[in-house]
Amino acid sequence: MKTDRNAPCPCGSGLKYKKCHGNPLAPAPAPAVPVVAASSAAILMPERVFAQALEHHTGGELVQAAALYQDLLLAHPRNPDVLHNLGLVLFQQGDFDAALEQIQRAISFAPARLEFIASRAALKVSRGEHAEAVADYERVGGALDGDALHNYSVALGRLGRTQAALAVCRQRIAQAPADARAHGQLGNLLTDAGQFEAAERAYREALRLRADDSATHSNMLLMLNYSEHLDAAALLREHRAYGEQHGGIWHSLPPLHANERTVSRRLRFGFLSPDFGEHPVGYLFEPLLANLDQSRFEPLLYATRQRNDALSHRLRATGAAWRECHALSDAELVGLLRRDRVDVLIDLAGHTAGNRLAAMARGAAPVQISYLGYPTTTGLAAIGHRFSDALIDPPGSDAGTEQTLHLTGGMFRYAPPPEAPEVSPPPLLNDGRATFGCYCNFSKVTAGTLALWAQVLKATPASRLLLKAAALADADTAAGLLSRLAALGVAAERVQLLGWTGYAEHLADYARIDVMLDTSPFNLAGNTCEALWMGVPVVSLRGARPAARMGASLLTAAGRPEWVAEDENQFVQIACQLVKDAKALAALRVGQRQALRASSLLDGASLARQIEDHCQRLFAAWAAQAQPLAAQARGVLHVGCGSPEAGKLPAYFDASIWRELRLDIDKQVAPDFVASTTDMHVVPASSMQALYSSHNVEHLYVSEVPKALGEFLRVLEPGGFALITVPDLKAAAERVLRDEQELPMYQSPAGPINALDMIYGYAPFVEGGNAFMIHKTGFTCRSLAQALTQAGFERVVVRSHGFALWAVAFKPAAGDGQRP
């Protein structure tokens, strides 16, 4: 397939193809020393080798592309195009350090090439080096397009420059109104700005354009926890809708895992998180990991975001196995978890940024639990349990799709950072006027929260308010907040606003406030623990949702239930009482750390014992009812297998449980069986335990579909199942009805796919003469389920996901009167 030279480059740099990967290989200076290791083709025909590498690269075959680029570099070590493209491959493979080295070399040889600067900026965004990324994007200037504008907006947003980020994001939407990711980023930025209704509209438009985008859907759910317009029941419905949309078909498959069923052995605990470092979740997770009995339980940390800080180093030093997973797809992550034989997988992210719930939906481990990073249900049926406590999720309440496991002493534990400074006297003691404060994610500062804080300030006329949030580094955001407070009767001279700082300075800043005021309806967690450790009392209002009861849980665990208010009047009374006596407040501060050391909040050992006991019990229950592993591998017939490449089978088909048998009409791909889907007589009847067919049935005429499904049924043993995926005709039709049939719906390895491709077959392949790629029929959920049932299958389940239909259908068990 040939890429349009004026189209955005598939590499993701954000520049046009003709200015990026499509740039012809420029003549390179001869190497100072002849290199004999390069291939003759790389030396004599570099343009041809470059074209081959580019074809592999844009087709997603990164290993092959990297090998060819490296071959070229042996002959042409100073060629900037090859260096740049090799850097992009390494970037896509997750080797950020090596990628940066190659791109830096490319820039050194061609400093005027703006596409190289844009690529370095994208890499900087991925490494969290947002200030450097913004500097690079500003250097590129007007040449920015596509992904570059998206990444520029992300970097600006992470620096707290919300209004500038919004302007860049809207520029991208004006360029490409059907870019779902741009609408999702708009939702993120509006959430940061506290504009929740506008954020919800942006998220829903993104999901209309790309319904399978689980990350955007998660971002919307997180935002809805901040919003004040939903009650607890409505919020639960939104989470269950996520599970329906993204849970997929995987929960309908037999729950087969190769884990040893012995319960008395050392169990493997997997912890999955983007926050194994200096992040509130990291600090709240450390007490559990530090106290886990590693003689009985082996911890494995699956890091979905790269971290390199003091806390990540401490977590690594515990002896837990560390797995870098940031570059893995969901299927690759599931494969890793299954190969590692994780017995219990505990997700620490929920619907927060960087989560991998889409991988957990595939049933990566026998026991899956949600904990810590998110205050309510995930909505996924594949996650069976959630750790909480009786204050956050009272017994008998509807807590969502998971079964709630209540932890005594509260669900949170805190490990004070070793670098924390000593407790300072309260400012009230010297100033004679109280300083209330809140250090938080600005999204939590809702209209109701500001109104409540304003009541506290009105009740203490000489007091001040100090607010600290990353978004307040943005002048427009800060001005808007001051205006909102002024409308509530709080003059600007009583308010001080701070942007975010480094962690050591952040902890020291607690010396600047007398009392921390919690947010509502989404309470603080990590910041509450920090404030308490720095001697600062925290006042929290108990609400109706789980997120609005975290403060009550934390303060009760800390031995301070008297700082929990049941209504707004009591909140104001508690805050005023705390600053009534400066000497008493100073004494409270001095004794706070000792009181915390005696509290449940710092008792990591009791938490670890409870979680160990729960997990051991849950794994024992799974082992008791799990299907025994067969002595021989189960057979899965891979219909229309194509070339024998790894990763084509879903990760569910664990190689230690399943043996892949390949069937294809093309003998050139060396299948085990050469046959068509409508005549598989070479495969014995009832010989397979499972069958997998990916995008084959739509290439048949309507009259041929019953024959193929009949063959699928025939080769399966009684009780065996077929896993089938085809394009979702309804999703394509909806695009056509909106006159959006030519707009890309998603990016495949072959290129962007639109509605017409889904209906008729991928146009570049068909136009290239590949008649096998023509689609001759199509399916909706109903019609596919009906066809499978009419073919003789039972227990048929069909789900729409990722613009495709996924179906699981079982062959009737022997003796039920059905045909074999």
Image (cartoon, rainbow, N blue to C red):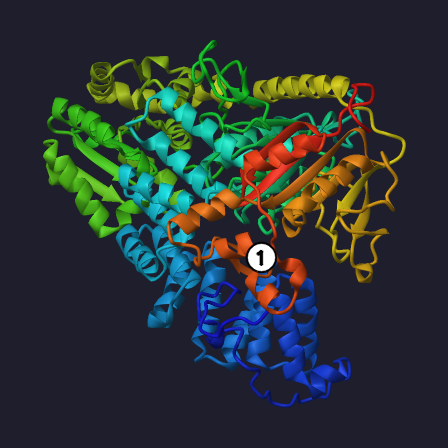
Horizontal relation, residue 766 to residue 413: left or right:
right
Query: In the depicted view, which residue is nearer to us: 666 or 447?
Result: 666
Horizontal relation, residue 292 to residue 543: left or right:
right
Q: Which residue appears at 27% of the width and 44% of the height?
A: 498
Q: Label 1: state its secondary structure.
A: loop
Residue beneath label 1, please?
761
The quarter of the rendered structure image containing the N terminus is bottom right
Q: Choose top left, top right, bottom left or bottom right for residue 466.
A: top left
Q: Which residue appears at 47% of the width and 10% of the height?
A: 395
Q: Which residue appears at 63% of the width and 49% of the height?
A: 698
Image vertical order of residue 176 relative to residue 204, above or below: below
Image vertical order of residue 399 relative to residue 808, above or below: above
Q: Choose top left, top right, bottom left or bottom right for residue 767.
A: bottom right
Residue 484 in the image: x percent, y percent? 16, 37
Query: In the depicted view, which residue is nearer to us: 132 or 715?
Result: 715
Query: In the depicted view, which residue is nearer to us: 311 or 351?
Result: 351
Horizontal relation, residue 446 to residue 236: left or right:
left
Instruction: Work out which residue is located at the far top of the displayed protein and give it.
Output: 396
Q: Amino acid at mark 1?
A: Gly
Residue 195 in the image: x percent, y percent? 26, 40
